[in-house]
Image (cartoon, rainbow, N blue to C red):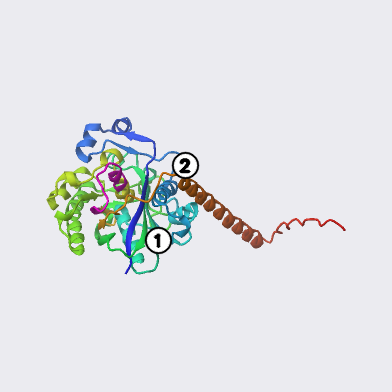
């Protein structure tokens, strides 16, 4: 039986930083008020031209580079996102085209739990022998759907993307267990924009349905109940206990929720990774970005047992128990590999261009327009 192992990881966060003091000039709030209630000091905001697709592409490329993997070998791309550029085509399809992958691609929507949901799908397909390589991306442009006049929500969210590249391996390890759950009866507690095919179209003057809406206290109570329990259930499925955890990587939504989950597990904060102060809540991007930074800071080491837990809109929750790779990625800093990565990128661009030309030819044929004939080379007369 093959096992699904993480071979590469990558992240992207926009360079544009929005601090609490910046927000205090936009709405009635203060740095002290935000920090005391959320633990957030600043967040990253997508700039002009930055979307879930573009940020996801950057994170995906970094994960593939980390693994020294050929994008053409990727058989599945899953994008976990609540903020796709469009309802369709899928964000994953656009990422697939940009990186030069060849297999299936689809989006998965489970709110802030989405990245773990997507990991469960990709890893189980690998374990079932359906595929050997997959790319899972969590990418969010939440600033696009935030009401910047709503103090209750605009202070919470930020933008970013993270990605894991997975491969099949006969060696036991990788993803050890998952715990997934949902309670749709609480769906109204955390909602996003109403879309065009809803029974409640967004029309002026009621544009409130075009933004994130949250009943904060109810979501807080829900999160403090499910975070620790989900982690415990996933550990039991893996045959492990809290004592086996080397690092706990929770969804970065609220520092007090994170601390509550740690207390439930009787886990010291030294074993909990927190970066909410830098990025706020980046939804499906939260956990992969945190894992990347934990590696960079030496908090997440080869062969560590990691527990990841998320909760979000749905209402949903998800936990995963993972054995981190024994090797810190395959990336070598040699010039041959840099050249190899560059060539792979050029091949992806040429492949995309060839496909686009094919679509354009089909459009011309459908419109009944003549296709310019190929120029014939003249043969010299003898």
Q: Nearer the viewer, residue 148 or 155?
A: 155
- Give the answer, above or below, for where 314 lies relative to 24: below
Which one is in front in this view, the residue at disc 1 or the one at disc 2? 1
**Image quadrant for the N terminus?**
bottom left
The residue singled out by tag 2 in the image is 49
The answer to if 293 sits in the magenta stretch is yes
Q: Nearer the viewer, residue 31 or 238?
A: 238
**Does residue 358 appear left or right of residue 372 in this picture?**
left
Mark nearer the N terminus (1 vs 2): 2
The answer to if 294 sits in the magenta stretch is yes
- Give the answer, above or below, for where 33 lies relative to 116: above
- x, y (%) of residue 19? 31, 33
Say which quarter of the image contains residue 47. top left
Disc 2 on helix, strand or loop? loop
Question: Does the image show residue 87?
Answer: no
Which residue is painted at 29% across and 48% down in the image? 291
Which residue is painted at 32% across and 65% down in the image? 170
Q: Nearer the viewer, residue 237 or 141?
A: 237
Q: Do residues under tags 1 and 2 come within 8 Å of each other at their CB atoms?
A: no
Disc 1 on helix, strand or loop? strand
Mark number, residue 208: none
Which residue is painted at 75% across and 55% down in the image? 375
Of all residues, the one furthest to the right in this rendering is: 382
The residue singled out by tag 1 in the image is 133
Crowding at dot 2, Cα within 10 Å, few <14 / some 14-19 / many 20+, comes out as: few
**Image quadrant for the C terminus?**
bottom right
- x, y (%) of residue 162? 36, 48
Report the magenta residues as a range. 290-309
Q: Please give the count of numbered marks on the rendered protein.
A: 2
Crowding at dot 1, Cα within 10 Å, few <14 / some 14-19 / many 20+, comes out as: many
């Amino acid at each position: 039986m093959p096992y699904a192992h993480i071979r590469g990881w990558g992240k992207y966060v926009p360079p544009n930083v929005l601090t609490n003091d910046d927000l205090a000039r936009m709405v009635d709030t203060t740095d002290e008020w935000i920090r005391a209630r959320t633990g957030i000091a600043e967040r990253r905001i997508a700039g002009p031209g930055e979307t879930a697709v573009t940020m996801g592409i950057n994170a995906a490329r970094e994960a593939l580079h980390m693994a020294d993997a050929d994008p053409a070998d990727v058989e599945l791309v899953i994008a976990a996102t609540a903020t796709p550029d469009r309802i369709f085509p899928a964000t994953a399809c656009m990422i697939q085209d940009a990186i030069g992958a060849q297999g299936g691609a689809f989006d998965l929507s489970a709110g802030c739990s989405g990245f773990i949901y997507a990991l469960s799908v990709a890893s189980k397909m690998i374990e079932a022998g359906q595929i050997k390589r997959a790319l899972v991306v969590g990418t969010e442009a939440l600033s696009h759907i935030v009401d910047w006049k709503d103090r209750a929500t605009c202070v919470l969210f930020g933008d970013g993307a993270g990605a894991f590249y997975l491969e099949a391996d006969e060696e036991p390890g990788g993803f050890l267990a998952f715990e997934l759950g949902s309670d749709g009866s609480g769906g109204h507690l955390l909602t996003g924009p109403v879309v065009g095919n809803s029974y409640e179209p967004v029309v002026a003057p009621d544009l409130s349905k075009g933004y994130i809406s949250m009943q904060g206290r109810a979501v807080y109570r829900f999160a403090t109940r499910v975070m620790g329990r989900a982690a415990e259930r996933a550990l039991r499925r893996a045959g492990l206990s809290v004592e086996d955890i080397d690092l706990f990587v929770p969804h970065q939504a609220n520092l007090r929720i994170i601390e509550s989950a740690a207390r439930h597990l009787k886990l010291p904060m030294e074993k909990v990774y927190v970066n909410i102060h830098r990025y706020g809540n980046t939804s499906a991007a939260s956990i992969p970005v945190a894992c990347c930074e934990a590696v960079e800071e030496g908090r997440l080491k080869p062969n560590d047992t990691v527990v990841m837990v998320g909760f979000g809109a749905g209402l949903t929750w998800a936990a995963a128990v993972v054995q981190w790779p024994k090797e810190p990625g395959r990336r070598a800093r040699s010039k041959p590999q840099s050249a190899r990565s560059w060539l792979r990128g050029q091949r992806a661009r040429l492949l995309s261009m060839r496909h686009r030309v094919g679509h354009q030819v089909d459009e011309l044929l459908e419109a009944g327009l003549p296709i310019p004939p190929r120029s014939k080379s003249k043969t010299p007369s003898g």
